Image (cartoon, rainbow, N blue to C red):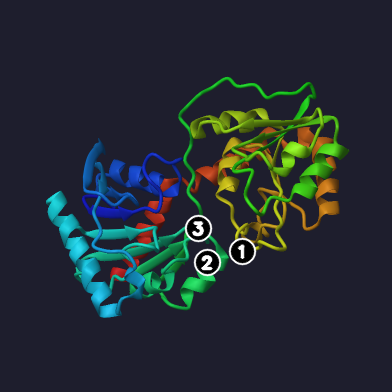
Amino acid sequence: MNGKTILLISPESWDDHHVSKHHYAEELAFMGNQVYFLEPKYEIYKEHISSGLTLLRYKKHLSGMRFLPRKLRAKIIVKDFLRIQDNIGRKIDIIWNFDSSRFYELSDIPHQVLKICHLVDLNQNFEWTTLVKTADYCFCVAKPIFKRLCQYNANTHLINHGYRESKVTLDVSLPGDNHIKAVYAGNLDIAYLDHQLIANLIETFTNVDFIFIGGFSENNPLRQIRKKNLFLTGKKPADSLNAYYRKADVLLLAYLADIYQDQVSNSHKIMEYLGSGKTVIASKTTDYLDSPYIEMAFSESEYLKKFDDIINNLELFNAASKQQERIDFARSNSYDKQIARINNILTEKSQ
């Protein structure tokens, strides 16, 4: 895919922590496309970021669009689209929408414009039904999302989370006096962290240092655990995380999988973890049930038992050959490869 003018609509700003939308924008631009990254900020603004990549904002007509009749809503969205197209001075070839709260009624967009719906988050559920119905193609990252989208659009395809290999080389150290290090990275305030399991791990395995990287609030339950082998580091730059993963012996995913099964069916964190090569132990993660690349437990007791097995056999679980297999899997899902998979689907369907 190259030589296209792409309007990429993101629910996150460019200045936010870079996730899939940002990485897709950068990779598409690198491939020779002109990408306009539309931020969720309502003002007229345009800024050149790099070759082929421009940051864009626009001033919307009015709020409460979802309450308007469908035909009127569609006309307003077309006007916004044409206004943006005039502003950039180029014909837009592709609308690539990650945001179900904006540009979700695509039925009146000119037919020669390819309309892609790409949902990577279950919390992107604003007007997703309309977006899915009026898109030409839909892509998603998890089986629960796939099942929902297929009800409204037969051109729905499952594309796994992308992997962005960090180019930053850092020499980092992990805190604690124990020889074995277990690491988790992410928002520590998310509702589906299994704090009871985490507390049991910390209390049971006093010979392991547990390092939690990420932001947390003052009343976070982890702050109530007074153990010498628990360390809360706070946030770290995204580009530095792989350096911390590589220093770890085991990487943790400990979620309330029975309660939040859909939300934790395929965490983007898994791909980041696997890219380090280190052993990953996870609570139930349905999209990886048959995967040889992560160690999965279906109950608290099984998790504790499996963790014990891992830390007592690290030379086996972190053998060079196993680490390379995990790294190869992550690299096989790099953003350029995911775009190639998407392009193959678009090409096959157009023939």
Tell me the residue that label 1 is attached to: 262
Q: Is residue 96 above or below residue 197?
A: below
Instruction: Identify residue type, mark 1.
Output: Asp
Q: Is residue 224 above or below residue 60?
A: above
Q: Are marks 2 and 1 in contact (CB under 8 Å)?
A: yes
Where residue 238 appears, x then y in whole percent? Answer: 50, 35
Q: Earlier in the sequence, mark 3 or mark 2?
A: 3
Mark 1, secondary structure of its residue: loop
Tell me the residue that label 3 is attached to: 121
Q: Residue at x 50, y 43 (%)?
A: 331
Tell me the residue that label 2 is attached to: 145
Where residue 67 appears, x then y in whole percent? Answer: 35, 75
Residue placed most toward the observer, 160 or 79:
79
Task: Check disc 3: other Cα within 10 Å, few if <14, some if 14-19, many if 20+.
Answer: some
Instruction: Identify residue type, mark 2.
Output: Ile
- Is residue 91 shown left or right of residue 284? left
